[in-house]
Image (cartoon, rainbow, N blue to C red):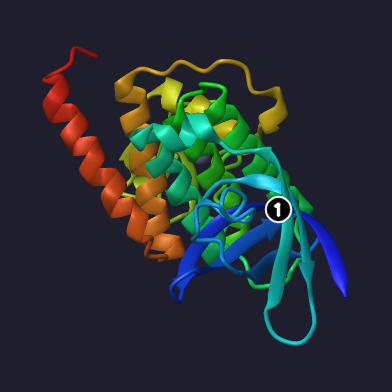
Amino acid sequence: MLHKCEGIVIRTRDYGETNKVVILFTRELGKVALMARGAKKTNSRLSSVSQMFTHGIYLYHGGSGMGSLQQGDMISSSRTMKEDLYKAAFAAYMAELLDKAVEDRKPNPFLFELLQQSYALINEGYDEEVISYIFELKLLPLFGVQPVLNQCVNCAAGEGDFSFSFRMNGFLCHRCKHLDDYRLPLSGKAVRVIRLFYFIDLQRLGKVSLQDSTKQEIKKVIRTYYDEYVGVYAKSRSFLDQMDRMKKTMEGPKDT
Ligand SMILES: [Zn+2]
């Protein structure tokens, strides 16, 4: 039977000399793996639609076992993202996290929108680091964890000087800071931005321009949080960190 779905390629692997297995994250079905016969040949009509990050409408034959991709109509090739090594590395990291967060064939239209909008914004020239932080924060509930970010995790105060407590799972205000000696101190700006990123609808995101020092604070919270609470090992993250170090070496010391 022929099925139709809207999807984004989040992983691929070679299958024999000429075929590819394409893992799509789709609006209708969630994650599905499809066999794309001949997709490794450059003249194949499946070649371009089975490349990483491609967003399109896909037709496939389904039965028992893996479906067979018949045709794809491209909506976006994500070309800008693919041609920039740095953007592509962030996009790959996001795809890998999503891949690990979801099971096969569990539809989640909210998540599809999140991925599609994130990639669209990176293609439009939004800061890929900012988009990846928003993505990582919004993915947390999928991994079954929800930090308290709208108020102090202990006394529920909305105002104050906040730090982040990994032990207590959220922001801790200055009145309660004695509860965790190992809390991570944060600037007021970083606190506001983390809150904004966690709660904002991506469609409403304006241009965000952050100082490097604020980005570093946010990154520290998110990465440590993932290590402590999510425990997912993403291969693409070490590549990302490597590139980060390289970029810094090339740019030299920066005043922030
Ligand atoms: Zn408090």
Q: Nearer the viewer, residue 36 or 124?
A: 36
Q: Nearer the viewer, residue 221 or 7?
A: 7
> Quick one: which residue is furthest to the right in this view?
1
> Quick one: which residue is furthest to the bottom in this view?
64
**Residue beneath the point at 34% across and 52% down:** 237
Where residue 197 appears, as percent x and y from the top left, is 57, 33
Amino acid at dot 1: Gly
If the image is split into quadrants, where does the N terminus sit? bottom right
Where residue 150 appears, as percent x and y from the top left, is 61, 37
Residue 131 is at least partly visible in this image: yes
Residue 146 is at least partly visible in this image: no
Q: Is residue 79 shown above or below 36? A: above
> Quick one: which residue is furthest to the front in this view?
43
* Mark 1: secondary structure: strand
> Quick one: which residue is furthest to the top in this view?
255
| 129 lies left or right of 156 | left
Ligand 1: does it lie within 8 Å of the C-beta at label 1?
no
Where residue 65 appears, as percent x and y from the top left, is 70, 85
Q: Is residue 38 shown above or below 245? A: below
If the image is split into quadrants, where does the C terminus sit? top left
Q: Is residue 26 shown above or below 67? A: above
Q: Quadrant of residue 174?
A: top left
**Residue beneath the point at 70% across and 72% down:** 68
Q: Quadrant of residue 16?
A: bottom left
- The residue identified by callout 1 is 7
**Residue beneath the point at 45% across and 38% down:** 82
| Mark 1 burial class by Cα count in 10 Å: few <14, some 14-19, many 20+ | many
**Residue beneath the point at 70% across and 23% down:** 204
Q: Quadrant of residue 167?
A: bottom left
Where residue 87 appears, as percent x and y from the top left, is 41, 34
| 36 lies left or right of 226 | right
